[in-house]
Structures are given as structure tokens and as C-alpha cells.
Amino acid sequence: MAFSGAKIIQPLPLHTTIRSPNNPLLFDPFTSSPFLGSTRTLRLSQSISASQRRCASHIVAVSDVFKEKKLKSNTNLLLTKEEGLQVYEDMILGRAFEDMCAQMYYRGKMFGFVHLYNGQEAVSSGFIKLLKKEDSVVSTYRDHVHALSKGVPARAVMSELFGKKTGCCRGQGGSMHMFSAEHNVLGGFAFIGEGIPVATGAAFASKYRREVLKEADCDHVTLAFFGDGTCNNGQFFECLNMAALWKLPIIFVVENNLWAIGMSHLRSTSDPEIWKKGPAFGMPGVHVDGMDVLKVREVAKEAIGRARRGEGPTLVECETYRFRGHSLADPDELRDPAEKARYAARDPITALKKYLIESKLANEAELLAIEKKIEEVVEDAVEFADESPAPSRSQLLENVFADPRGFGIGPDGSYRCEDPKFTEGTAQV
Amino acid sequence: MWGILSQKLGAARGLSSQVVGNYVLRLRLAPSAMPMRHYSSATKEMTVRDALNSALDEEMAADPNVFVMGEEVGEYQGAYKITKGLLDKYGPERVVDTPITEAGFAGIGVGSAYHGLRPVIEFMTFNFSMQAIDHIINSAAKSNYMSAGQINVPIVFRGPNGPAAGVGAQHSQCYGAWYGSVPGLKVLVPYSSEDARGLLKAAIRDPDPVVFLENELLYGETFPISAEALDSSFCLPIGKAKIEREGKDITITAFSKMVGYALKAAEILEKEGINAEVINLRSIRPLDRATINASVRKTNRLVTVEEGFPQHGVGAEICATVVEDSFGYLDAPVERIAGADVPTPYAANLERMAFPQIEDIVRAAKRACYRSVPMAASA
């Protein structure tokens, strides 16, 4: 029995009998579904307490504003031309790169577990393009596009996937462990939920720097990306609690693509509306259409602004979809083709292209030029990765420790504590 | 007498004159060790608890990036009072009381270490670290390798490890073997106050993740401590074992509380004419194979002592390394003493049987020396 994506959209109570495909849809998905145009969250949020409503309404107002803006679609207030082209280019890069990954995997150049991001580009571009270089991004195993959006060069990511020395982690990390200290991409974690406490820690460091180390201008925020399956994991709740408790500058971005490998979000979650879990811990919970990069960007701006001002964390649930299987090894048989078709029709790249052209921010030729350029970038990345050498044998034992000899043994091999000058301490007690 | 003593000590491999000098100095200051002359210079003594507290205090004063995080570390002054007084001195931003969320706060520690802070994460006991073990291993230990050296994790996970007294099966496991098998971690096991101070300071200054296994029953024990160890920049090397007692007939390796037992066993053995060398491992990873092998090559017999479970334990690794490197020097099969292969029972007499006692060490040592003794009852 297959579920269609639209049928999950229903307010409480959740366990109704509306599961048979024969029942008429409660909502027409294209006009009234809350998942398609965040306005319905207004209705759903009214059942929560006043204080929480204050929090949530702060965010819901954005959707209101956005809705108004959309009506006056002739104003280009949503984003400028440069921003539009930048976001478009980023999304095209993400898509082209992932498609090339699939090709390379089937040709045997890439191996192991590879999880592709096709269809979810609006979330990555919508959020990450608003960040500064010093802000941090923590992701899951589906991390290629997060790394690319944050600024890691396509060449470095592709080489890493090929397992070459020139990869961003010298071939030691792989598809699921993209790290870049320069771009503050803090991984790449294979375990579900593992990145969330690490991201919370990065946000903790930012707050610590500002308040304890007195670096007054340290307002770095952290984005934690994870999926719908993770939202049932204990670490997620532990971190929602602590982030809200200590008002950490973090945004929890849920990429709800409705499926955790073959486990549907509905089958595994008692209350599938993830955004609601935010107010339960004292932070705003927002739901946004993750297939629309402009909506995501608006919500992201608000949430990042909140975090930078020190007002605390936000939970943003992006309804999105992955066009491919969970990984390249997933036959993807459990998802209803009708559902896939419906989301394919909402392809975020097509939607943005349409918007840019209709609002006269760009013309066909410019967008085509971008696509061509990205094609070349990706091809160049593949060539570069192909020609790069594999890691040398000596690399196997490198980088286990930052300090392999352990403190206390000086660089000349003798024990520091034997040095007569050793007890001339520098510590002031 | 002093001359002969320092000659003997100097002859032992691996000790420089400076260290020998220190050892002699310590003997002089510990009147019980030398029956001959009694120096009245004040012997400073310190409990392990105070040693850990002072080490934390000094490191936090020296480096503002160091902070402590864990359950009850702040207002409660530490579940075992190790962090006593730190909250008042450094404030709640640096001594952070957490909710009961081991996975969460261990991960938060790792994430902040990614950005250059130096967290000291306290687990109320290392049994609770099992709820956070994903972060200790996957995001702390492996990160430097996975990122090819871009991101190192200068974090310390510390807390009491191993059995206490009557706390039952879920509070009594020793984690030395589990953490000791993970590349990317450094695992330290202090015994005396000097060990505690020196190793904790080294751990906090170390740029890699360190698992610091203390022992609850040792917290209250007092040890003599030298002036050098009280200096605020005193550190001990990581990966170097200490020969607590020189001997020539048999090598006994131990760590944490078992060092005390081994020393007492050595005294008993001395009366029977077996001169035992006791090695305090101090560091399970990296294991000081050089010292252990050198000692076995001298004595030709080995007994390893630990409180953890026998299979795949620390003793197993030591035996393997000795057999691999010094097989030709062994005069007897290697002996392993470990905790019984059962979850820890509660009843006092059963618990006593479940962990090595001094008599077990003595018996094993005699076995290794081919004295005929009845085998201990195998649990």
C-alpha cells in the first residue's frame, strides 16, 4: 500500500483511517496544503501556549510577509540579481556534481557508500549562501553539496570521492566524512544524529569565545543539517534542550525528505510534524517548503539573524525530497512513483529559473551560460581527480594523532620533565 | 649506601641521572622506605582528589580555553568532589553543569574542541561513557585522521573507572581495554597523586583526545608528593610507564588501584625470596612496550594484573607483545590476572572473589617462578 506525499498533510489527530487511496484527499495539495506554502502553519501554531506562540509567531510573520511579497510579484525585493544568479549557480553546481558522482560511481571510480543530494538543493543553497566563511556547517553522510555550497572547491570534493591524495581530506575521509577547516565544514558524519551534538558544540564555542574569551565580535553561527529519521533519535532531543537552555547560536535544519532509506517518516514517527518539537523545548519551530529556495532563504535569514543577535536556536523543518535513492546502492523500490513525479514537478532549480526569468532578473542566455560554466567546472573536477595520484603508502599511519609522541616528550626525544628548565613554569596559579 | 643505591638505580635501563636523582630524593623524603636515616624535612602529602583538583585549577588558570563540563561538576562541587571550588573561582561559563545527556554533552565537547577550545568532560563514572561512546570514538578519536590532520580534538574525557565497593554490575566495569584498542585516543591511568597531577596536566595540554581513567577508591588515598610535582608546569610524559619497584626475579605490570596491590604483593614475595619488579603502566595507549619488554628481558617472567574482564583485556595485549618481542627471554609462561569473567556481583564476599586480591598476585607470581602452589579457584 503506497502513500502519496500529499496525504500525510493533515492536522491532529494523526492516526485516522485516511490511508486508502480511494478516499478523497482532505486537502488539495496544490492550493491548501501547509506543506506547500507555509501559510497553514499559522493555523496549526495557534494551539500552542502564548509564550511559545510569541516565539513561533515571530517566525510565522516572515511567511506572512513573504506571502504578501509574493502577491506583489513585480517587486524584486526577494533577492537582487547577483544574489539570484549566485544561488542559481550554487544549485546547478550541486545538481551537476551529484549527477556526475552517479556516473563515476557506476564507472567504478567512486566506491563505498555514496549518498546523493538531488532534489534538496534549495535547502543547501538557501541556507549556506547566507553564511560567512567563519560560520560552521555540520552535516550527515549526504554532505557533498553542503561542502560545495560552503565553498570547498569541486576539485577537492571530487578527488576526495575518488580517494585521491588531493582530496579535501587527502582521501582519508571519503564521501561521508567531508571536513574542511578552512571553510568550517565540520563533517560529514555517518551516524545519524552524531553531527547534532558536534554542531551544538561548535555553537557553544562561538558563545564561549564571545563571553569568556571576550572576543566581542564573535557572532559565528552553526548550521546543523540532518534528516527526518534523525528527529526520532535521542541526541537530537538532548541538543534541542541544551541549545535552548544555553541560548546557543545554532540553527537545526531538518531536511525532511519523508524517507529514511525505506522507512517512511509516517511509519516511524508518532507526530510527523517535526517543527513542533522546537516549541516543546522553548525555541521557535518553523516549517518551510524546502523545494522553494526563496522561501527557504527568507526563513534562513530570520533564523540566522536571531542566532547572530544571541537570541538562541531555531528549528527549521524543510519539506524536501530526494530524487534518487538513499544511496547509489539503494534500489529505491518502496517509494510511490506518483509521489516522485509530484516532487519532480516541483524541482527547485526549475522553480528558481522560472522565477528569475519571470521577474526579469535574468534571461535565458545568462542562465544557460551559468549551466555551461558549471558543466565545465564539474568536468574539470573529474579530470583533476582522475589525474591525481593515490595516497602514498606512508600516509596510512599519518594523522592518527596531532601529537604522536604525547606531551611531555620534547621534539628532541627526551622527556620534557628531565629538562632542568622544565619547572620554570609559565602558569600563574 | 647512597652511592651503591644510585649506582644500582642508574644501571637500570632507561633512567637518566636526573630521574635517578629524583628517585633518590623521593626515597630520602619518604622515611618509611629507608630504615636507616630519618630526615626530618617535611614530606608533602596529597590525596589523589586534591591532586586532580589542583591540576584542573592550574590548567584552567593558565589557559582560558580550558573548561570543565559534566554532571554535578559545578554547584554540587563534583560528584566525587574532584571539581570542588572551581565554580566559585571560574564561574558557570567555565564550569558547566549539564543535564543528564552524556551523548549530548560529550558531542558538544567534541564540537567545541573542533574550534580550539579545550574541554574537560567529566563522566560521573566511565560506565556512563557508554552512552557517549559514539562521540568519544567516532567524532573525537577518528576526526584527526578522517580530516587528514585539519581538525584535531584537544579534549579530555575523565572520570572514575572500574569497580568501587558494592556498586553492582552496571557501575563496576573497567574500560581500559575498550578505549585502549582505538587508534586516535590516548588512554591514561594514574595511580598516585603525582601520576594524577602530572598526567592530567599533560592530558589537558595534549592536542589529541585523551581518556583519563581514574579510580574512585584511590581518590581518598594519600601519597607523598615531591616539590617538583607541585610546580604548576609539572607534566608527565604520555606513553611512558614507571617502574615503581625495582626487582630481578619477576615483572608484575599493573595500573590504577592494582599498582598498590602489586606493591603489597611484592613485599610479601620479598619475604619468600622473590624479588619482584612492579611496573605502573600509567598509559594504556600508547602502551610502553619498551619498558615492559626491557623489564621482562631482565627478569624473564611476567605477571599482568588488571581489574577488567580477562578476554581481550589489557593483560592480553601485554602478554602478546612480550611473547612477540621477548619470547626467547621468557623462562615461564606469561601469567594474566584479571577480574572474573562475570558481571560484578553485589554481595561483598562475591565481589571480593570477582576482582584480583593481593593473594592472587602472590600466587600467580609463585606459579611463574615454578613454586608449587594450589591454583586459585576459577570463577
Image: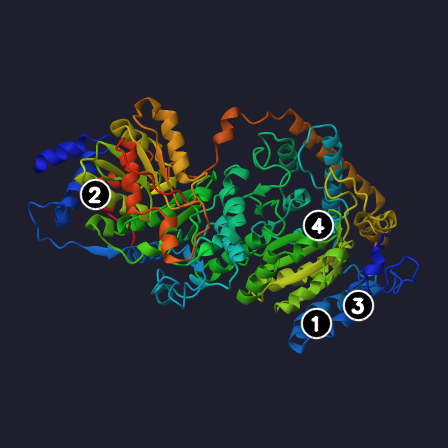
- In-image side of A318 versus B255 (left or right): right
x, y (%) of residue A320?
76, 53
Q: Tell me the SS state at disc 2.
A: helix
What amino acid is labelled 3 in the image? Pro
> Which percent across, then down, holds residue B171?
44, 56
Q: Which residue is mark 2?
A: B268
- Callout 4: residue from which chain? A
Residue that extends furthest to the top in the rendered view of this protein: B328
Q: Mark 4 = which residue?
A: A125
Binning the other alpha carbons within 10 Å of mark 3 as few (below 14), some (14 to 19) or many (20 upward) gives few
Marks 4 and 2 sit apart, C-alpha to C-alpha, by: 72 Å
Q: Is residue B162 left or right of residue A128?
A: left
Give the mark toward the camera: 1 or 2. Answer: 2
List the residue tagged with mark 3: A11
Are the residues flagged by discs 2 and 3 in contact, CB closer than 8 Å? no
Seen in the picture, residue A336 relative to A414 is either above or below; the reply is: below
Residue behind mark 1 = A57
Answer whether labels 4 and 1 touch (C-beta < 8 Å). no
- Location of residue A325 in the rendering, given as x and y in whole percent from the top left corner: 76, 43
Residue at the image position 61 percent from the left and 44 percent from the top: A188
